[in-house]
Image (spheres, grey):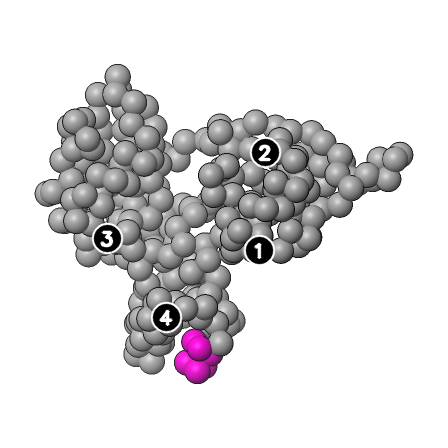
C-alpha cells in the first residue's frame, strides 16, 4: 500500500479526491485493526481502489449479494469472518419498497426518486426492481433517513421496510442469447455481434469513449476480450461474452453472447 500511487491511478481531479477519501477510511481501519468500509463504488472505481490497495489482506468487495454491480470495499480484521457482513451491524442495509403491482416502475424511476429525495448516489448500491416491490441497498448510516423520507417514486406511493440481507430478492435478468462466429475477439467485433450493428459503427462507439469492459472504460476497438467479460455501451445497453466455443471449419471463433434486454 502506497498513498503516492493515487496520482498514478487517477485520471482526473475527481478520481484523486475519491481515492484520497478511500485511502483515509480504509487505512484508518487497518491501523486500528477495526472494520472499515468505503461508500458504494462503481466497477471502475472499485478497480481503481484495488490498484491502490493491492493485495492487502482483509479487503473484500461487498454489495449485499454475490453478483452486485455496485460494491463497497470493506476491511475486516482477521478476527472477523466474511459472514459477519450479513449480520445486523453490516455496513450496508437492504430496504424493500412495496407498491401497487399494477404500476410499472423501472430502475430509472427508483434511482431518480432517491436522488430527488436528497440521497447521494454514493450511498446507494444496486437497485433490484421486481413486480410490486423493489429491493435496494444503502449504507447503514443513510438507512434511517431513507426509511423516513423515501415515500414515493413519481406518483406511486411506496411502503419501505428494512429486511435481512439474505432475504433480498434479486430478479433474474432478461437475456437474449446470440450465437455467432467472429473473426476475432476484438471489442468492436463483439459489440457488432451483440448489438447487431456494423463493425465500423461499433468501433466509433468505442473510440468515442462510450464503451466499458467490466466497468472499465476502453477506447481501443482492437482490445481483445475474454470469456465472461461484460461490455456496456452507452446508448445501446449491456452484453456478456458468455462462452467461447473454439474454431469452426472456416477458422472463425464460435461464440455465445448474452444481451441484457
Residue 79 location (% of width, % of height): 37, 69
Residue plotted at (16% across, 33% down): 152
Disc 1 and disc 4 in contact, CB within 8 angstroms: no
Residue 127 location (% of width, % of height): 33, 40
Mark 1 to mark 4 CA distance (whole Å): 20 Å
Q: Nearer the viewer, mark 4 or mark 3?
A: 4
Asked if residue 53 shows in the view, the reply is: no
Q: Report the disc number at residue 219.
A: 1
Residue plotted at (47% across, 31% down): 173
- Judging by the rendered image, the residue that carries numbered circle 4 is 13
- Label 4: state its secondary structure: helix
Mark positioned earlier in the residue sequence (4 or 3): 4
Magenta span of residues: 1-7
Q: Is residue 30 left or right of residue 259?
A: left
Q: Nearer the viewer, residue 200 or 63?
A: 200
Residue plotted at (25% across, 21% down): 103
- Judging by the rendered image, the residue that carries numbered circle 3 is 120
Q: Which is the main secondary structure of the residues drawn in magenta? A: helix
Mark positioned earlier in the residue sequence (2 or 1): 2
Mark 4 to mark 2 CA distance (whole Å): 34 Å
Mark 2, residues whose alpha carbon is within 10 Å: few (<14), some, or many (≥20)?
Answer: some
- Judging by the rendered image, the residue that carries numbered circle 2 is 195
Residue 27 location (% of width, % of height): 35, 76
Asked if residue 54 shows in the view, the reply is: yes
Q: Is residue 4 magenta?
A: yes
Mark positioned earlier in the residue sequence (3 or 1): 3
Q: From this view, report whether residue 41 is shown above or below residue 259.
A: below
Disc 2 and disc 1 in contact, CB within 8 angstroms: no
Residue plotted at (22% across, 29% down): 98
Mark 1, residues whose alpha carbon is within 10 Å: few (<14), some, or many (≥20)?
Answer: some
Mark 4, residues whose alpha carbon is within 10 Å: few (<14), some, or many (≥20)?
Answer: few
Amino acid at each position: 500500500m502506497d498513498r503516492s500511487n493515487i496520482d498514478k491511478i487517477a485520471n482526473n481531479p475527481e478520481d484523486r479526491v475519491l481515492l484520497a477519501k478511500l485511502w483515509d477510511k480504509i487505512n484508518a481501519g487497518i491501523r486500528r485493526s477495526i472494520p472499515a468500509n468505503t461508500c458504494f463504488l462503481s466497477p471502475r472505481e472499485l478497480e481503481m481502489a484495488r490498484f491502490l490497495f493491492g493485495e492487502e489482506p482483509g479487503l473484500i468487495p461487498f454489495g449485499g449479494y454475490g453478483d452486485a454491480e455496485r460494491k463497497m470495499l470493506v476491511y475486516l480484521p482477521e478476527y472477523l469472518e466474511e459472514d459477519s457482513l450479513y449480520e445486523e451491524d453490516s455496513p450496508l442495509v437492504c430496504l424493500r419498497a412495496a407498491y401497487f403491482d399494477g404500476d410499472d416502475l423501472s430502475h430509472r424511476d427508483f434511482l431518480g426518486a432517491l436522488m430527488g429525495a436528497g440521497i447521494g448516489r454514493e450511498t446507494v448500491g444496486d437497485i433490484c426492481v421486481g413486480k410490486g416491490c423493489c429491493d435496494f441497498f444503502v449504507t447503514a448510516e443513510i438507512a434511517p433517513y431513507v426509511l423516513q423520507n423515501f415515500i414515493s417514486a413519481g406518483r406511486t406511493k411506496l411502503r419501505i421496510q428494512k429486511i435481512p440481507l439474505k432475504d433480498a430478492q434479486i430478479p433474474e435478468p432478461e437475456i437474449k442469447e446470440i450465437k455467432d462466429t467472429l473473426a476475432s475477439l476484438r471489442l468492436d467485433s463483439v459489440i457488432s455481434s451483440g448489438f447487431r450493428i456494423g463493425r465500423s459503427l461499433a468501433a466509433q462507439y468505442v473510440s468515442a469513449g462510450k464503451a466499458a469492459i467490466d466497468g472499465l472504460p476502453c477506447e481501443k476497438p482492437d482490445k481483445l476480450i475474454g470469456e465472461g467479460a461484460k461490455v456496456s455501451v452507452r446508448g445501446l445497453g449491456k452484453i456478456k461474452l458468455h462462452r467461447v466455443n473454439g474454431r469452426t471449419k472456416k477458422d472463425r471463433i464460435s461464440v455465445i453472447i448474452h444481451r441484457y434486454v
